[in-house]
């Protein structure tokens, strides 16, 4: 059994989050991020992707799921606070859920069209070129 990792101070987190995870915050002693989706199908896809990452990492966030949003809350329960494990998983979630091929140079993938509300997926923080979100 591995020893519990060190809990990061609020000062450490407040200096790192804007640079490493600008869309995440600290709420009630946990890392927090809300993903807004276009509806139930998109919400389930986000939940499943996060579930896969959490299981692969063997580090599980608390999720709150509603029709068009997924709230992710991360802390290391065994350590009693936020640790490097939480930052690492948050970073991987951000990388996977926030990925938009249209923002990558020379991508042959176009990404989900945002112009048609029936096809929208996630309300991204950084809209792709030609997107409306």
Image: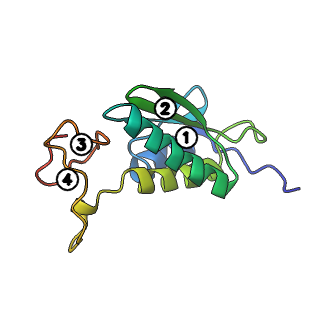
SS at mark 4 in the image: loop
Mark 4 or 3, nearer chain start: 3
Horizontal side, residue 103 vs residue 75: left or right: left
The residue pinned by badge 4 equals: 128
Q: Quadrant of the N terminus?
A: bottom right
CB atoms at circles 3 and 1 under 8 Å apart?
no
The residue pinned by badge 1 equals: 11
Q: Is residue 53 above or below residue 7?
A: below
Mark 3 or 2, nearer chain start: 2
Mark 3 or 1, nearer chain start: 1
Q: Quadrant of the C terminus?
A: top left
Dot 2, how many residues are within 10 Å of its Cα: few (below 14), some (14-19), or many (20+)? some
Dot 1, how many residues are within 10 Å of its Cα: few (below 14), some (14-19), or many (20+)? few
Residue 131 pos. (x, y %): 15, 47
Mark 1 or 2, nearer chain start: 1
Mark 4 or 2, nearer chain start: 2
SS at mark 1 in the image: helix
The residue pinned by badge 2 equals: 71
Q: Nearer the viewer, mark 3 or mark 2?
A: 3
Nearest the camera: 93 or 18? 93
Residue 19 pos. (x, y %): 40, 52
| Residue depicted at x 40% and y 31% | 40
CB atoms at circles 4 and 3 under 8 Å apart?
no
Horizontal side, residue 64 vs residue 78: left or right: left
CA separation in Å, label 3 and label 2 = 22 Å
């Amino acid at each position: 059994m591995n020893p519990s990792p060190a809990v990061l101070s609020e000062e450490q987190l407040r200096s790192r989050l804007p640079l490493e995870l600008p869309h995440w915050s600290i709420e009630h002693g946990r890392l927090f991020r809300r993903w807004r989706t276009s509806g139930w199908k998109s919400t389930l896809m986000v939940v499943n992707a996060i579930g896969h990452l959490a299981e692969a990492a063997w580090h599980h966030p608390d999720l709150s799921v509603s029709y068009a949003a997924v709230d992710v809350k991360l802390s290391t329960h065994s350590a009693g606070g936020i640790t490097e494990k939480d930052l690492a998983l948050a970073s991987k979630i951000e990388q996977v859920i926030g990925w938009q091929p249209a923002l990558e140079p020379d991508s042959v993938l176009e990404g989900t069209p945002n112009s048609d509300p029936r096809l929208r997926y996630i309300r991204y923080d950084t809209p792709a070129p030609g997107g409306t979100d």
